[in-house]
Image (cartoon, rainbow, N blue to C red):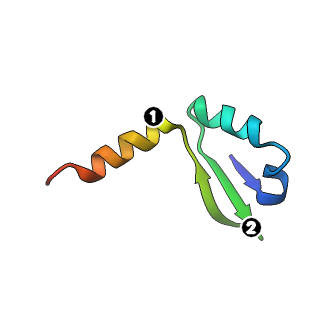
Amino acid sequence: MRVATTEARTKLSELLKAAEQGQTVELTKYGSTQAVIISNERYERLIRNLMEPE
């Protein structure tokens, strides 16, 4: 899901709920992704995978 930052300001709780349900929420500015909202579970999984030794 892609959402303009101006729209995200008024829909933050809705966007957080979407992220909690597993969706990736891209926050855009002038059509370019500036940030991403993901669930804490997914974030922790990504960090854990990055920190695993190769």
Is 26 left or right of 29, judged from the image as shown?
Answer: left
> Which residue is rendered at x = 14% and y = 54% of the image?
54
Q: CA distance from mark 1 to mark 2?
A: 27 Å
Q: Nearer the viewer, residue 33 or 44?
A: 44
Q: Is residue 25 above or below residue 20?
A: below
Q: Which residue is mark 2?
A: 31
- SS at circle 1: helix
- Percent from the top left, x then y, of residue 8? 78, 50
Q: Which residue occupies 30% across, 44% down?
A: 48
Q: Residue at x 69, y 56 (%)?
A: 27
Q: Nearer the viewer, mark 1 or mark 2?
A: 1
Q: Which mark is residue 17?
A: none
Total tally of numbered discs in the picture: 2
For badge 2, the amino acid type reads Gly
Residue 43: x, y in percent? 45, 43
The disc placed on residue 41 is 1
